[in-house]
Amino acid sequence: MTTTTKKMLAAVNIDKITMRKGGFVIPSQDEDAPDVFTAIDGTGIASFACVSYTGRDLDANTLFARYVESGAKVPNVGKLLADLDEYLSQIKSFKVGNVLGIRTDGNSAALYLAHNRPPDGTI
């Protein structure tokens, strides 16, 4: 089953952030930094991200293509596609404006609500 959603996470500046605010993110693919998000365009990482309305359906294949276009190397395509599908499925359970963090247990990643909206009221 392929999950589609019109929601996506965008980096938000409430904690350490090394990328521009507002860039779309996916769970980090770096085993040395598992509990952060990485910019889908490869420009950095963020500890937190805000649920944003995209206006169009996104699926794992779309996110995968954008990530690979950034020059990212993907050692296990099937695993990443499955992880992205699960990620999109989890995003659907949160409201636009929610600020999320991510926790990993080695095998999977779980999104959690960090704030109902960005503390400064902006994305």
Image: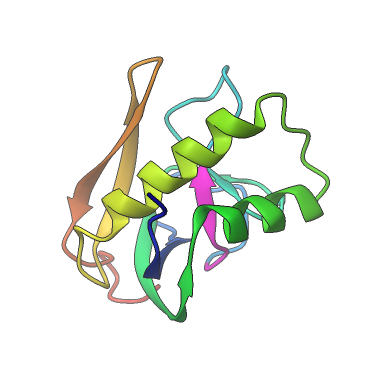
Image-quadrant location for residue 80: top right
User: Residue at point 36% right, 62% down?
Assistant: 50
User: Residue at point 66% right, 25% down?
Assistant: 76
Residue 3: percent from left, percent from top: 38, 56
**Residue 48 in view here:** no
Residue 7: percent from left, percent from top: 37, 69
Indicate left or right for 50 with 27 as reference.
left
Give the answer, above or below, for where 55 lies relative to 101.
below
Q: For the magenta stretch, what is the residue range?
A: 22-27
Residue closest to the far front? 1
What is the basis of the colouring in this image?
Answer: rainbow
* Residue 3 colored in magenta in the image: no
Q: Nearer the viewer, residue 100 or 16?
A: 100
Residue 47: percent from left, percent from top: 43, 42
Give the answer, above or below, for where 47 lies relative to 75.
below
* Residue 24 colored in magenta in the image: yes
